[in-house]
Image: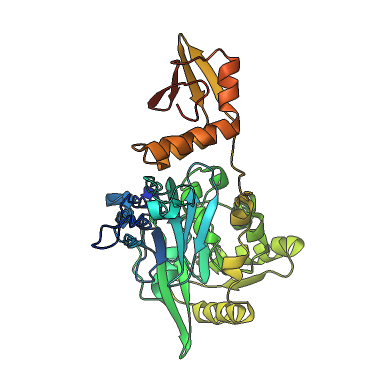
Amino acid sequence: MFVDKAKIYVKGGDGGDGLVAFRREKYVPNGGPAGGDGGKGGDVIFRVDEGLRTLMDFRYQRHFKAKRGEKGRNKSQHGANAENMLVRIPPGTVVIDDDTGEVIADLTRHGQQVVVARGGRGGRGNTRFATPANPAPELAENGEEGQERYVTLELKVMADVGLVGFPSVGKSTLLSVVSAAQPKIGAYHFTTITPNLGVVEVEEGRSFVMADLPGLIEGAHTGIGLGHEFLRHIERTRITIHVVDMAGSEGRDPFDDWVKINDELKLYNSTLAERPQIVAANKMDMPDAEEHLEQFKEQVAAVRPDLEIMPISSLTRQGVKELLYRAADLLDQMPEEADVEEVAEVQERKVYKLEKEEDESFRIVRENEIFIVESPKIERMMKRMQLNSHDAILKLARTMRHMGVDNELRKRGAEDGTIVRIGDFEFEFVEGSSYY
């Protein structure tokens, strides 16, 4: 089964907690603080592995969590950083933040990698908080939480040449003739429901990758038929071979087919209309094909006189060799990275963000006799600080006084003994004191 889209959850490892410790050595009185910092949590990293071809693995494992850093140690020793978690993905994968729609990365080359969830920083030990005024602080921080998010992975087939056209025009047959690929072939629509890849050798030292992309129909750009599920793969191809049933074996007009498919490509992504295209006038071994070809050339000449039309028959292999040589020549004339760098859809979905300044705003709500303080900065600080020591409470009180929370509580009527709640913690307000 071919899987080309997956939604997964990733979380960086939490940082290790800092340690409160003191030197206790013989003949060293009042040794001072010796608590080390916690280690950094592991990052979740996506790395391209050219040995993978699908996102099948993500169908069975959808959660990826990196390990947390080790706690700080005594003697001012730093806790060990956690190892990063490497997740292998196939080339051609676009990584998208599921909440914002931001494209995190577009990974195409073997070994390329990107950090999708950063690990949290380790908490500082009490050694870091020593000052001349407080040379032996009983103060340390908890490790920072690792980044977590849901990401969507979209795989776009990496091929030099893409075969496009209505269902049952002979794309799969052509691929099976020119390469060792063995796509399913049948006399009914949508025989091909997953992209097929094949390596085409034109001559010694000259080859390219060809993809048989599932048949498109009118309205595909809105999701009709296989729609968006496989239109995205055409963006990766450097040139397209538009296969047209010149015999009109299903009662359709070849020119109408050509116009409709081109319109679908243009409506999905305008840059696809500018990509080099060769029309493979297929099924020339069937009756009326020659007559239809002449009429088709006249109609196309009125719209795109520069378009190349090459008559072929996948069944008898008539003209197939000439088609492959012409495709190889076009590829030689194109820059190698054209297919990766000029995808408009990815550019449009990029989101640019400025660094956020620290939010020092707060809000005070009164519920009966309790004052509730809501502040992102204070709540984040309380999450980091180990509030089991007098020093930690003092530091929190100083921060709140500096932000103006004290004065605002007094204005709202707070007195000695009034209960103040912040997050999951409750304190008593003490008038004229430096702490709660």
Res. 396 visible in picture = yes
User: Which residue is more in the foreground, 382 or 305?
Assistant: 382
Name the foreground residue: 130 vs 336.
Answer: 130
Quadrant placement of the C terminus: top left
Percent across and percent down for residue 181 are: 36, 71
**Residue placed furthest toward the top:** 368
Q: Residue furthest bottom?
A: 204
Q: Tell me the quarter of the image containing the N terminus.
A: bottom left
Judging depth in this view, the residue of 161 and 142 nearest the camera is 142
Image x and y of residue 209, in percent = 46, 74
Q: Position of residue 302 (x, y in %)?
A: 76, 61
Q: Say whether residue 162 is left or right of residue 10.
A: right
**Residue at position x 68%, y 66% in the image:** 297
Against 113, is 419 above or below? above
Residue 172 placement: quadrant: bottom left
Which sits in the foreground, 216 or 78? 78
Q: Residue at x 60, y 60 (%)?
A: 343
What residue sits 52% from the left and 49% below the top? 217
